[in-house]
Image: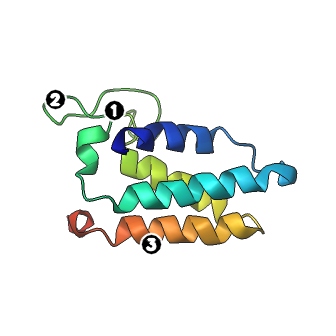
Amino acid sequence: NVVDLEPCLALLSAQDSANHERWEIRYILLLWLAILAIVPFNLDTVDSSQQAGGAKVSSPDDPATGEKETLIDRIVNTCKACLSEASKTRDAAAYVLAQLLTRPDMED
């Protein structure tokens, strides 16, 4: 279900990458995220950082701009962090990025 996208991402972001005994959890969450990323829906419709008018909600989440990161930014940043792991999570993170960045609506 598309409403599971942000909770899945939040749970993945909360995982400790230094805990090598729990890599399976990160791996499964990444695979789940890859499945959610290919569902044909507009990511902006489930992005909680977007207001009704499409403007970003101000928040200290992104220190460079002072704005809350978009859902796509959070997915990319989380996956980039997983790419440095020496386990299957690296493969899964690369797969999520491939699925996400090859979406037709990502051409903008």
Query: Residue 102, image x and y in percent?
Result: 33, 73
Whole-percent x, y for residue 24 in the image: 74, 56
Q: Is residue 17 left or right of residue 41?
A: right
Residue 48 - label: 1
**Disc 1 residue type (three-letter):** Ser
Kind of residue at disc 3: Ala
Mark 2–mark 3 CB contact (< 8 Å):
no
- Mark 2: amino acid: Ala
The numbered dot on residue 52 is 2
Locate residue 10 relative to residue 1 in the image: left or right.
right
Q: CA distance from mark 1 to mark 3?
A: 23 Å
Q: Residues within 10 Å of mark 2 (few under 14, many from 20)?
A: few
- From the top left corner, tell me how far across and down residue 101 is, in percent: 37, 68
x 56%, y 52%: residue: 78
Q: Which residue is mark 3?
A: 98
Residue count near mark 1 (Cα–Cα under 10 Å), binned few <14, some 14–19, many ≥20:
some
Quadrant in the picture for residue 65: top left
Say what secondary structure mark 1 lies in.
loop
Q: Are marks 1 and 3 in contact (CB under 8 Å)?
A: no
